Image (cartoon, rainbow, N blue to C red):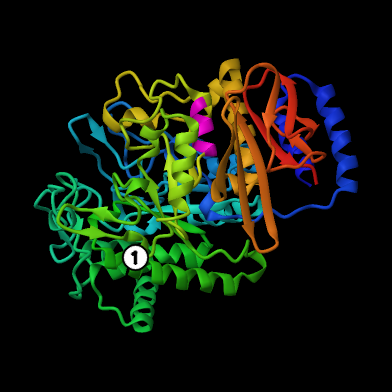
Amino acid sequence: MKKLLVILTLLPFCIGCNEVKKQQQETTQVVEEETPEKTVPFLWEGANVYFLLTDRFNNGNPENDVNFGRTEETGVLRGFEGGDIQGVIKKIEEGYFTELGVNAIWLTPLVEQIHGATDEGTGLTYGYHGYWTKDWTALDPNFGAKKDLEKLVKTAHKNGIRIILDVVLNHTGPVTEKDPVWPDDWVRTGPPCEFTTYENTTECTLVANLPDILTESDEPVELPDALLAKWKDEGRLSKELDELNLFFERTGYPRAPRYYIIKWLTDYINDYGVDGFRVDTVKHVNENAWSDLRKEADYAFEMWKKKHQDKILDDNPFYMVGEVYNYGISGGRDYDFGDKKVDFFSYGFKSLINFELKTDAAKPYEEIFKKYSNLLNTKLKGKSVLNYLSSHDDGGPFDKERKQPFRAANVLLLTPGASQIYYGDETSRPLVVEGAQGDANLRSFMNWQDLDSLPDVQIVHRHWQKLGQFRRNHPAIGAGKHKILGKTPYVFSRTYTDGEYKDKVVVGLDLPKGKKSLWVKGFFGDGTKLYDTYSETEVMVANGKVLLDNDYEVALLELVE
Protein backbone atom coordinates (compact mmCIF):
# COMPACT_ATOMS: atom_id res chain seq x y z
CA MET A 1 0.00 0.00 0.00
CA LYS A 2 3.03 2.33 0.34
CA LYS A 3 3.08 3.22 -3.32
CA LEU A 4 -0.61 4.06 -3.16
CA LEU A 5 0.00 6.33 -0.15
CA VAL A 6 2.62 8.27 -2.08
CA ILE A 7 0.39 8.71 -5.11
CA LEU A 8 -2.44 9.96 -2.96
CA THR A 9 -0.41 12.39 -0.90
CA LEU A 10 1.59 13.81 -3.78
CA LEU A 11 -1.52 15.07 -5.51
CA PRO A 12 -1.34 18.46 -3.71
CA PHE A 13 2.17 19.02 -5.13
CA CYS A 14 0.78 19.39 -8.65
CA ILE A 15 -0.26 23.01 -9.17
CA GLY A 16 -2.40 23.91 -12.15
CA CYS A 17 -2.31 20.45 -13.71
CA ASN A 18 -5.76 18.96 -13.37
CA GLU A 19 -5.19 16.43 -16.16
CA VAL A 20 -2.21 14.96 -14.34
CA LYS A 21 -4.25 14.82 -11.13
CA LYS A 22 -7.03 13.02 -13.01
CA GLN A 23 -4.58 10.47 -14.40
CA GLN A 24 -3.05 9.93 -10.95
CA GLN A 25 -6.47 9.42 -9.42
CA GLU A 26 -7.31 6.83 -12.08
CA THR A 27 -4.00 5.06 -11.36
CA THR A 28 -4.77 5.14 -7.65
CA GLN A 29 -8.06 3.32 -8.17
CA VAL A 30 -6.33 0.45 -9.96
CA VAL A 31 -3.57 0.15 -7.32
CA GLU A 32 -6.11 0.26 -4.52
CA GLU A 33 -7.94 -2.74 -5.94
CA GLU A 34 -4.76 -4.78 -6.33
CA THR A 35 -2.69 -3.85 -3.27
CA PRO A 36 -3.55 -4.72 0.36
CA GLU A 37 -3.04 -1.97 2.88
CA LYS A 38 -0.04 -2.24 5.19
CA THR A 39 -0.51 -0.71 8.61
CA VAL A 40 2.22 1.68 9.71
CA PRO A 41 2.65 1.68 13.51
CA PHE A 42 2.74 5.01 15.31
CA LEU A 43 5.82 5.50 17.49
CA TRP A 44 6.32 8.50 19.76
CA GLU A 45 10.08 7.94 19.36
CA GLY A 46 9.79 8.95 15.70
CA ALA A 47 6.69 11.17 15.76
CA ASN A 48 6.31 14.14 13.44
CA VAL A 49 4.97 16.80 15.84
CA TYR A 50 3.57 20.15 14.70
CA PHE A 51 3.85 22.86 17.37
CA LEU A 52 1.59 25.89 17.03
CA LEU A 53 0.58 28.89 19.09
CA THR A 54 -3.18 28.50 19.19
CA ASP A 55 -3.72 32.27 18.94
CA ARG A 56 -1.41 32.62 15.93
CA PHE A 57 -2.31 29.76 13.61
CA ASN A 58 -5.77 30.12 12.10
CA ASN A 59 -8.87 32.12 13.08
CA GLY A 60 -11.82 29.76 12.83
CA ASN A 61 -14.29 31.90 14.80
CA PRO A 62 -13.85 35.71 14.71
CA GLU A 63 -16.73 36.05 17.19
CA ASN A 64 -14.46 34.95 20.07
CA ASP A 65 -11.63 37.38 19.29
CA VAL A 66 -12.27 39.76 22.25
CA ASN A 67 -13.08 38.70 25.82
CA PHE A 68 -12.75 40.12 29.34
CA GLY A 69 -12.31 43.66 28.02
CA ARG A 70 -8.89 42.88 26.53
CA THR A 71 -8.90 45.92 24.28
CA GLU A 72 -5.90 47.94 25.45
CA GLU A 73 -3.23 48.72 22.87
CA THR A 74 -0.30 46.33 23.22
CA GLY A 75 3.26 46.14 21.98
CA VAL A 76 3.78 44.67 18.49
CA LEU A 77 2.50 41.04 18.42
CA ARG A 78 1.74 41.11 22.15
CA GLY A 79 -2.05 41.01 22.02
CA PHE A 80 -4.56 38.38 20.92
CA GLU A 81 -4.58 37.91 17.14
CA GLY A 82 -7.66 35.68 16.76
CA GLY A 83 -6.34 32.15 16.29
CA ASP A 84 -8.41 29.48 18.02
CA ILE A 85 -9.22 25.78 18.34
CA GLN A 86 -11.81 25.97 15.58
CA GLY A 87 -9.11 27.26 13.25
CA VAL A 88 -6.94 24.22 13.99
CA ILE A 89 -9.92 21.90 13.41
CA LYS A 90 -10.52 23.47 9.99
CA LYS A 91 -6.93 22.87 8.92
CA ILE A 92 -7.14 19.24 10.06
CA GLU A 93 -10.33 18.79 8.05
CA GLU A 94 -8.72 20.43 5.00
CA GLY A 95 -5.91 17.87 5.17
CA TYR A 96 -3.17 20.42 5.84
CA PHE A 97 -1.48 18.34 8.54
CA THR A 98 -1.95 15.03 6.73
CA GLU A 99 -0.31 16.42 3.59
CA LEU A 100 2.60 17.60 5.74
CA GLY A 101 3.06 14.14 7.24
CA VAL A 102 2.16 15.34 10.73
CA ASN A 103 0.89 12.71 13.16
CA ALA A 104 0.79 14.77 16.37
CA ILE A 105 -0.17 18.40 17.07
CA TRP A 106 1.15 20.26 20.12
CA LEU A 107 -0.95 23.29 21.11
CA THR A 108 0.06 25.99 23.55
CA PRO A 109 -1.93 26.01 26.84
CA LEU A 110 -5.67 26.47 26.34
CA VAL A 111 -6.65 27.26 29.95
CA GLU A 112 -8.12 30.60 30.96
CA GLN A 113 -5.51 33.34 30.98
CA ILE A 114 -5.19 36.44 33.13
CA HIS A 115 -7.78 39.03 32.13
CA GLY A 116 -5.53 42.06 32.38
CA ALA A 117 -2.35 43.08 30.59
CA THR A 118 1.12 43.54 32.03
CA ASP A 119 4.10 45.57 30.84
CA GLU A 120 7.32 43.61 30.39
CA GLY A 121 9.21 46.68 29.20
CA THR A 122 8.14 46.01 25.62
CA GLY A 123 4.65 47.47 25.75
CA LEU A 124 1.50 45.96 27.24
CA THR A 125 1.20 42.18 26.86
CA TYR A 126 -1.83 39.92 27.23
CA GLY A 127 -1.65 36.17 27.88
CA TYR A 128 -2.20 35.31 24.20
CA HIS A 129 0.50 32.61 24.43
CA GLY A 130 -1.31 30.59 27.08
CA TYR A 131 1.39 30.41 29.76
CA TRP A 132 -0.24 32.90 32.19
CA THR A 133 -2.92 30.84 33.91
CA LYS A 134 -5.79 32.37 35.86
CA ASP A 135 -8.01 29.28 36.11
CA TRP A 136 -6.80 25.75 35.24
CA THR A 137 -10.38 24.43 35.23
CA ALA A 138 -11.63 26.61 32.37
CA LEU A 139 -10.63 27.19 28.75
CA ASP A 140 -9.93 30.74 27.68
CA PRO A 141 -12.83 31.85 25.46
CA ASN A 142 -10.34 33.46 23.07
CA PHE A 143 -9.14 29.94 22.28
CA GLY A 144 -12.58 28.33 22.33
CA ALA A 145 -15.03 26.32 24.41
CA LYS A 146 -14.72 22.81 25.83
CA LYS A 147 -16.96 21.49 23.05
CA ASP A 148 -14.32 22.80 20.61
CA LEU A 149 -11.61 20.85 22.42
CA GLU A 150 -13.79 17.74 22.32
CA LYS A 151 -14.26 18.16 18.57
CA LEU A 152 -10.54 18.87 18.08
CA VAL A 153 -9.52 15.56 19.64
CA LYS A 154 -12.21 13.62 17.76
CA THR A 155 -11.29 15.21 14.43
CA ALA A 156 -7.58 14.70 14.97
CA HIS A 157 -8.02 11.06 15.94
CA LYS A 158 -10.23 10.45 12.92
CA ASN A 159 -7.29 11.61 10.81
CA GLY A 160 -4.68 9.56 12.66
CA ILE A 161 -3.30 12.59 14.52
CA ARG A 162 -2.57 12.75 18.26
CA ILE A 163 -3.16 15.85 20.39
CA ILE A 164 -0.54 17.12 22.85
CA LEU A 165 -1.57 19.84 25.28
CA ASP A 166 1.01 22.21 26.76
CA VAL A 167 0.65 22.33 30.55
CA VAL A 168 2.04 24.65 33.24
CA LEU A 169 2.45 23.58 36.87
CA ASN A 170 5.28 25.95 37.84
CA HIS A 171 3.56 29.33 38.00
CA THR A 172 0.36 31.33 37.75
CA GLY A 173 -0.06 34.34 35.51
CA PRO A 174 1.30 37.77 36.42
CA VAL A 175 -0.53 40.03 38.87
CA THR A 176 -2.61 42.82 37.31
CA GLU A 177 -5.46 45.06 38.46
CA LYS A 178 -7.86 42.39 37.20
CA ASP A 179 -5.81 39.44 38.44
CA PRO A 180 -4.88 39.44 42.14
CA VAL A 181 -1.98 37.38 43.44
CA TRP A 182 -2.78 33.89 44.73
CA PRO A 183 -2.55 33.40 48.54
CA ASP A 184 0.95 33.16 50.03
CA ASP A 185 0.44 29.53 51.01
CA TRP A 186 0.05 28.80 47.28
CA VAL A 187 2.78 30.94 45.71
CA ARG A 188 6.06 32.74 46.32
CA THR A 189 6.79 36.10 44.72
CA GLY A 190 10.57 35.92 45.26
CA PRO A 191 13.49 35.50 45.26
CA PRO A 192 14.31 35.58 41.51
CA CYS A 193 15.97 32.46 40.11
CA GLU A 194 19.76 32.55 39.78
CA PHE A 195 20.16 29.23 37.90
CA THR A 196 23.43 28.26 39.62
CA THR A 197 22.17 25.59 42.04
CA TYR A 198 19.24 23.19 42.31
CA GLU A 199 17.56 25.28 45.02
CA ASN A 200 17.91 28.65 43.30
CA THR A 201 16.49 27.11 40.12
CA THR A 202 13.45 25.41 41.67
CA GLU A 203 12.41 27.54 44.68
CA CYS A 204 12.33 30.95 43.01
CA THR A 205 10.48 33.08 40.47
CA LEU A 206 11.47 32.84 36.81
CA VAL A 207 10.95 36.54 36.18
CA ALA A 208 9.55 39.49 38.10
CA ASN A 209 5.77 39.40 38.65
CA LEU A 210 5.38 35.70 37.84
CA PRO A 211 4.24 34.07 41.10
CA ASP A 212 5.79 30.64 41.58
CA ILE A 213 3.61 27.76 42.79
CA LEU A 214 4.93 26.11 45.98
CA THR A 215 5.20 22.79 44.15
CA GLU A 216 7.62 21.34 46.72
CA SER A 217 5.16 21.79 49.59
CA ASP A 218 3.02 19.00 51.05
CA GLU A 219 1.13 21.37 53.36
CA PRO A 220 -2.66 21.37 52.81
CA VAL A 221 -4.10 24.70 51.61
CA GLU A 222 -7.57 26.12 51.12
CA LEU A 223 -8.81 27.15 47.70
CA PRO A 224 -8.36 30.88 47.00
CA ASP A 225 -11.43 32.99 47.74
CA ALA A 226 -11.16 34.61 44.30
CA LEU A 227 -11.35 31.22 42.58
CA LEU A 228 -14.29 30.09 44.72
CA ALA A 229 -16.14 33.32 43.93
CA LYS A 230 -15.43 32.87 40.22
CA TRP A 231 -16.76 29.32 40.22
CA LYS A 232 -19.86 30.45 42.11
CA ASP A 233 -20.54 33.24 39.60
CA GLU A 234 -20.18 30.70 36.79
CA GLY A 235 -22.60 28.27 38.47
CA ARG A 236 -20.14 25.40 38.92
CA LEU A 237 -18.94 25.73 42.51
CA SER A 238 -20.60 22.53 43.80
CA LYS A 239 -19.43 20.50 40.81
CA GLU A 240 -15.81 21.58 41.19
CA LEU A 241 -15.77 20.97 44.95
CA ASP A 242 -17.39 17.54 44.60
CA GLU A 243 -14.84 16.49 42.01
CA LEU A 244 -11.96 17.65 44.20
CA ASN A 245 -13.34 15.68 47.15
CA LEU A 246 -13.53 12.53 45.03
CA PHE A 247 -9.98 13.06 43.73
CA PHE A 248 -8.42 13.48 47.16
CA GLU A 249 -10.44 10.58 48.59
CA ARG A 250 -9.26 8.29 45.78
CA THR A 251 -5.60 9.29 45.85
CA GLY A 252 -4.99 10.08 49.50
CA TYR A 253 -2.83 13.05 48.51
CA PRO A 254 -2.61 16.03 50.88
CA ARG A 255 -4.47 19.08 49.59
CA ALA A 256 -1.20 20.76 48.65
CA PRO A 257 -0.99 23.22 45.73
CA ARG A 258 0.55 20.83 43.19
CA TYR A 259 -2.10 18.17 43.72
CA TYR A 260 -4.97 20.56 43.02
CA ILE A 261 -3.30 21.56 39.75
CA ILE A 262 -2.46 17.96 38.82
CA LYS A 263 -6.13 17.09 39.25
CA TRP A 264 -7.19 20.01 37.06
CA LEU A 265 -4.66 19.21 34.33
CA THR A 266 -5.45 15.51 34.13
CA ASP A 267 -9.17 16.28 33.78
CA TYR A 268 -8.40 17.19 30.16
CA ILE A 269 -7.19 13.63 29.61
CA ASN A 270 -10.09 12.00 31.42
CA ASP A 271 -12.73 14.18 29.75
CA TYR A 272 -11.41 14.53 26.19
CA GLY A 273 -8.82 11.82 25.59
CA VAL A 274 -5.84 14.04 24.77
CA ASP A 275 -2.83 11.86 24.01
CA GLY A 276 0.04 13.68 25.65
CA PHE A 277 1.39 16.63 27.62
CA ARG A 278 4.25 18.91 26.75
CA VAL A 279 5.32 20.03 30.21
CA ASP A 280 6.56 23.59 30.64
CA THR A 281 9.49 24.72 32.84
CA VAL A 282 10.34 21.22 34.05
CA LYS A 283 13.63 22.02 35.78
CA HIS A 284 11.97 24.74 37.90
CA VAL A 285 9.82 22.20 39.75
CA ASN A 286 10.85 19.49 42.22
CA GLU A 287 11.16 16.35 40.06
CA ASN A 288 8.88 14.31 42.35
CA ALA A 289 5.98 16.48 41.22
CA TRP A 290 6.43 15.13 37.69
CA SER A 291 6.16 11.56 38.93
CA ASP A 292 2.86 12.55 40.56
CA LEU A 293 1.63 14.16 37.34
CA ARG A 294 2.63 11.08 35.35
CA LYS A 295 0.85 8.71 37.71
CA GLU A 296 -2.41 10.66 37.52
CA ALA A 297 -2.09 11.19 33.76
CA ASP A 298 -1.74 7.44 33.24
CA TYR A 299 -4.77 6.81 35.45
CA ALA A 300 -6.86 9.40 33.56
CA PHE A 301 -5.80 7.99 30.17
CA GLU A 302 -6.82 4.48 31.19
CA MET A 303 -10.17 5.76 32.49
CA TRP A 304 -10.81 7.53 29.20
CA LYS A 305 -9.94 4.39 27.23
CA LYS A 306 -12.31 2.28 29.32
CA LYS A 307 -15.14 4.72 28.63
CA HIS A 308 -14.32 5.09 24.91
CA GLN A 309 -13.10 1.69 23.76
CA ASP A 310 -14.31 2.32 20.20
CA LYS A 311 -12.17 5.48 19.95
CA ILE A 312 -8.78 4.14 21.07
CA LEU A 313 -6.13 4.74 18.41
CA ASP A 314 -3.58 2.19 19.64
CA ASP A 315 -2.03 0.78 22.80
CA ASN A 316 0.58 3.52 23.21
CA PRO A 317 0.71 4.83 26.79
CA PHE A 318 0.15 8.48 27.61
CA TYR A 319 3.00 10.65 26.31
CA MET A 320 4.89 13.21 28.38
CA VAL A 321 7.66 15.33 26.89
CA GLY A 322 9.44 17.82 29.11
CA GLU A 323 10.96 21.22 28.51
CA VAL A 324 14.15 21.16 30.57
CA TYR A 325 15.54 24.42 29.24
CA ASN A 326 18.99 23.93 27.64
CA TYR A 327 18.93 20.14 27.94
CA GLY A 328 20.94 18.61 25.09
CA ILE A 329 21.03 15.04 23.84
CA SER A 330 24.79 14.81 24.44
CA GLY A 331 24.10 14.96 28.18
CA GLY A 332 22.41 11.56 28.04
CA ARG A 333 19.84 11.13 30.78
CA ASP A 334 21.15 13.68 33.28
CA TYR A 335 20.60 17.42 33.60
CA ASP A 336 23.29 19.19 35.65
CA PHE A 337 22.10 21.97 37.99
CA GLY A 338 25.66 22.72 39.09
CA ASP A 339 25.41 21.12 42.52
CA LYS A 340 23.09 18.26 41.61
CA LYS A 341 22.25 16.09 38.60
CA VAL A 342 18.71 14.93 37.88
CA ASP A 343 17.56 12.22 35.46
CA PHE A 344 14.15 13.60 34.49
CA PHE A 345 13.52 10.52 32.33
CA SER A 346 13.12 8.63 35.62
CA TYR A 347 10.34 10.98 36.76
CA GLY A 348 7.65 10.29 34.19
CA PHE A 349 9.08 11.62 30.94
CA LYS A 350 9.24 9.53 27.79
CA SER A 351 11.11 12.31 26.05
CA LEU A 352 12.77 15.68 26.59
CA ILE A 353 13.01 18.58 24.17
CA ASN A 354 16.51 18.62 22.68
CA PHE A 355 18.02 22.11 22.56
CA GLU A 356 21.12 20.85 20.73
CA LEU A 357 19.96 20.25 17.15
CA LYS A 358 19.77 23.95 16.30
CA THR A 359 23.57 24.17 16.66
CA ASP A 360 24.24 20.70 15.25
CA ALA A 361 22.26 21.63 12.13
CA ALA A 362 25.23 23.39 10.49
CA LYS A 363 27.38 20.22 10.68
CA PRO A 364 27.64 17.61 7.89
CA TYR A 365 24.56 15.39 7.63
CA GLU A 366 26.42 12.19 8.47
CA GLU A 367 27.94 13.69 11.60
CA ILE A 368 24.47 14.67 12.85
CA PHE A 369 22.66 11.46 11.94
CA LYS A 370 25.37 9.12 13.27
CA LYS A 371 25.59 11.00 16.59
CA TYR A 372 21.84 10.93 17.21
CA SER A 373 21.41 7.31 16.16
CA ASN A 374 24.24 6.22 18.45
CA LEU A 375 22.99 8.17 21.48
CA LEU A 376 19.37 7.05 21.08
CA ASN A 377 20.48 3.42 20.87
CA THR A 378 22.87 3.57 23.84
CA LYS A 379 22.57 6.21 26.60
CA LEU A 380 18.94 6.98 25.77
CA LYS A 381 17.77 3.54 24.69
CA GLY A 382 14.07 3.16 25.48
CA LYS A 383 13.63 6.94 25.69
CA SER A 384 13.67 9.69 23.07
CA VAL A 385 14.19 13.37 22.37
CA LEU A 386 12.04 15.92 20.56
CA ASN A 387 14.24 17.81 18.10
CA TYR A 388 13.56 21.34 16.88
CA LEU A 389 15.24 24.10 14.89
CA SER A 390 12.99 27.03 15.79
CA SER A 391 10.57 27.62 18.64
CA HIS A 392 8.37 30.15 20.42
CA ASP A 393 10.98 31.26 22.95
CA ASP A 394 14.36 30.51 21.39
CA GLY A 395 15.88 33.76 20.16
CA GLY A 396 18.74 31.91 18.49
CA PRO A 397 17.06 29.46 16.10
CA PHE A 398 18.77 27.76 13.19
CA ASP A 399 18.35 29.81 9.99
CA LYS A 400 16.70 32.80 11.66
CA GLU A 401 16.47 34.63 8.33
CA ARG A 402 14.97 31.60 6.55
CA LYS A 403 17.79 31.39 4.00
CA GLN A 404 18.18 27.60 4.24
CA PRO A 405 14.64 26.17 4.30
CA PHE A 406 15.55 23.02 2.35
CA ARG A 407 18.48 22.15 4.61
CA ALA A 408 16.32 22.88 7.64
CA ALA A 409 13.75 20.35 6.42
CA ASN A 410 16.42 17.75 5.65
CA VAL A 411 18.01 18.08 9.09
CA LEU A 412 14.83 18.27 11.16
CA LEU A 413 12.82 15.58 9.39
CA LEU A 414 15.64 13.10 8.80
CA THR A 415 17.50 13.27 12.13
CA PRO A 416 16.79 10.28 14.43
CA GLY A 417 14.37 11.09 17.24
CA ALA A 418 11.00 12.81 17.16
CA SER A 419 10.73 16.04 15.16
CA GLN A 420 9.00 19.28 16.13
CA ILE A 421 7.95 21.46 13.23
CA TYR A 422 7.30 24.96 14.57
CA TYR A 423 4.36 26.47 12.73
CA GLY A 424 5.63 28.22 9.62
CA ASP A 425 8.93 26.35 9.39
CA GLU A 426 7.40 24.75 6.31
CA THR A 427 6.35 28.10 4.79
CA SER A 428 9.37 30.23 5.74
CA ARG A 429 7.25 32.33 8.11
CA PRO A 430 9.45 35.29 9.17
CA LEU A 431 11.19 35.05 12.55
CA VAL A 432 12.19 38.72 12.49
CA VAL A 433 9.31 41.22 12.51
CA GLU A 434 9.68 44.98 12.26
CA GLY A 435 8.75 46.67 15.53
CA ALA A 436 8.58 43.43 17.51
CA GLN A 437 10.82 42.89 20.51
CA GLY A 438 12.09 39.69 22.07
CA ASP A 439 10.04 36.53 21.71
CA ALA A 440 7.30 38.41 19.86
CA ASN A 441 9.48 38.18 16.73
CA LEU A 442 9.01 34.42 16.76
CA ARG A 443 5.22 34.56 17.09
CA SER A 444 3.75 36.26 14.03
CA PHE A 445 0.49 34.99 12.58
CA MET A 446 0.82 31.99 10.25
CA ASN A 447 1.66 33.26 6.75
CA TRP A 448 -1.18 31.61 4.84
CA GLN A 449 -1.20 34.40 2.26
CA ASP A 450 2.43 33.67 1.34
CA LEU A 451 1.62 30.00 0.88
CA ASP A 452 -1.30 30.89 -1.39
CA SER A 453 0.55 33.41 -3.55
CA LEU A 454 4.35 33.02 -3.53
CA PRO A 455 5.84 30.30 -5.79
CA ASP A 456 9.09 30.19 -3.79
CA VAL A 457 7.15 29.46 -0.61
CA GLN A 458 5.08 26.82 -2.39
CA ILE A 459 8.24 25.04 -3.58
CA VAL A 460 9.64 25.02 -0.03
CA HIS A 461 6.31 23.77 1.30
CA ARG A 462 6.22 20.87 -1.19
CA HIS A 463 9.70 19.82 -0.08
CA TRP A 464 8.59 19.73 3.58
CA GLN A 465 5.47 17.77 2.55
CA LYS A 466 7.45 15.11 0.71
CA LEU A 467 9.92 14.58 3.56
CA GLY A 468 7.17 14.77 6.17
CA GLN A 469 5.04 12.12 4.48
CA PHE A 470 8.01 9.82 4.02
CA ARG A 471 8.89 10.22 7.69
CA ARG A 472 5.32 9.48 8.79
CA ASN A 473 5.05 6.44 6.53
CA HIS A 474 8.40 5.03 7.69
CA PRO A 475 9.09 4.67 11.43
CA ALA A 476 12.66 3.74 10.49
CA ILE A 477 13.43 7.41 9.80
CA GLY A 478 12.88 8.65 13.37
CA ALA A 479 13.02 5.45 15.41
CA GLY A 480 15.34 3.23 13.36
CA LYS A 481 19.08 2.62 13.23
CA HIS A 482 21.21 4.71 10.88
CA LYS A 483 24.01 3.48 8.61
CA ILE A 484 25.96 5.27 5.90
CA LEU A 485 26.01 3.47 2.53
CA GLY A 486 27.87 5.94 0.35
CA LYS A 487 29.85 9.16 0.84
CA THR A 488 29.70 10.63 -2.69
CA PRO A 489 26.89 10.96 -3.36
CA TYR A 490 25.75 10.78 0.24
CA VAL A 491 23.45 7.78 0.76
CA PHE A 492 22.29 6.24 4.05
CA SER A 493 19.90 3.59 5.28
CA ARG A 494 17.54 3.34 8.24
CA THR A 495 16.14 0.12 9.65
CA TYR A 496 13.43 -0.42 12.26
CA THR A 497 12.35 -3.84 13.51
CA ASP A 498 9.71 -4.74 16.08
CA GLY A 499 8.65 -8.37 16.11
CA GLU A 500 7.32 -9.24 12.67
CA TYR A 501 7.22 -5.61 11.56
CA LYS A 502 10.26 -4.40 9.65
CA ASP A 503 10.82 -1.10 7.88
CA LYS A 504 13.81 -0.44 5.60
CA VAL A 505 14.50 2.75 3.65
CA VAL A 506 17.35 4.46 1.83
CA VAL A 507 17.82 8.23 1.52
CA GLY A 508 20.13 10.25 -0.70
CA LEU A 509 20.98 13.90 -0.01
CA ASP A 510 22.95 16.59 -1.88
CA LEU A 511 22.64 14.51 -5.03
CA PRO A 512 23.87 15.83 -8.39
CA LYS A 513 21.30 17.01 -10.90
CA GLY A 514 20.70 14.79 -13.90
CA LYS A 515 21.94 11.19 -13.92
CA LYS A 516 23.01 9.81 -10.56
CA SER A 517 23.99 6.48 -9.08
CA LEU A 518 23.07 5.60 -5.48
CA TRP A 519 25.02 2.81 -3.75
CA VAL A 520 22.71 0.40 -1.88
CA LYS A 521 24.82 -2.78 -1.91
CA GLY A 522 24.53 -4.81 1.26
CA PHE A 523 21.16 -3.29 2.09
CA PHE A 524 18.94 -3.95 -0.94
CA GLY A 525 19.91 -6.86 -3.16
CA ASP A 526 20.08 -6.87 -6.95
CA GLY A 527 16.66 -7.25 -8.54
CA THR A 528 14.88 -5.45 -5.67
CA LYS A 529 12.20 -3.05 -6.86
CA LEU A 530 12.28 0.34 -5.13
CA TYR A 531 10.17 3.47 -5.38
CA ASP A 532 11.63 6.96 -5.06
CA THR A 533 8.78 8.89 -3.48
CA TYR A 534 10.53 12.21 -4.07
CA SER A 535 10.58 11.93 -7.87
CA GLU A 536 7.75 9.35 -8.09
CA THR A 537 9.99 6.93 -9.96
CA GLU A 538 10.17 3.14 -9.76
CA VAL A 539 13.67 1.68 -10.08
CA MET A 540 15.42 -1.66 -9.74
CA VAL A 541 18.67 -2.42 -7.94
CA ALA A 542 21.40 -3.63 -10.31
CA ASN A 543 25.08 -4.15 -9.54
CA GLY A 544 24.48 -2.85 -6.03
CA LYS A 545 23.23 0.50 -7.33
CA VAL A 546 20.10 2.44 -8.16
CA LEU A 547 20.13 4.77 -11.16
CA LEU A 548 18.03 7.93 -11.23
CA ASP A 549 17.81 10.71 -13.81
CA ASN A 550 16.16 13.89 -12.52
CA ASP A 551 17.00 17.35 -11.24
CA TYR A 552 16.24 16.58 -7.59
CA GLU A 553 18.94 16.63 -4.93
CA VAL A 554 16.98 14.23 -2.70
CA ALA A 555 15.94 10.60 -3.12
CA LEU A 556 13.59 8.79 -0.73
CA LEU A 557 13.66 5.08 -1.54
CA GLU A 558 11.22 2.49 -0.22
CA LEU A 559 10.46 -1.10 -1.11
CA VAL A 560 7.73 -1.72 -3.68
CA GLU A 561 5.31 -3.98 -1.83
Does 561 sit above or below residue 187?
above
Q: Position of residue 11 (x, y in %)?
A: 74, 31
**Mark 1 residue crowding within 10 angstroms, few (<14) / some (14–19) / many (20+):** some
Magenta stretch secondary structure, dominant: helix
- How far from the left and from the top, in percent, is residue 38? 76, 53
Residue plotted at (14% across, 56% down) = 339
Residue 27 point in image, percent of width and height: 87, 35
Q: Which residues are magenta?
A: 407-414
Residue 549 as seen in the image, left or right of residue 50: right
Can residue 329 be seen by looking at this rendering? Answer: yes
Q: Nearer the viewer, residue 139 or 360?
A: 360
Is 385 on the left or on the right of 335, as rendered? Answer: right
Which residue is identified by label 1? 347
Expressed as whole percent of the image width and height from the top left, the position of residue 430 reads: 42, 23
Secondary structure under badge 1?
helix
The residue shown at (49%, 36%) is 412
Residue drawn at (36%, 22%) of the image: 432
200 sits to left or right of 466? left
Q: Is residue 411 magenta?
A: yes
- Residue type, mark 1 in image: Tyr
Identify whether 256 is placed above or below 70. below
Q: Quadrant of residue 73?
A: top left
| Nearer the observer, 240 or 359 | 359
The answer to whether residue 74 is visible is: no
Q: Establish if 100 lies above or below 190.
A: above
Q: Is residue 4 magenta?
A: no
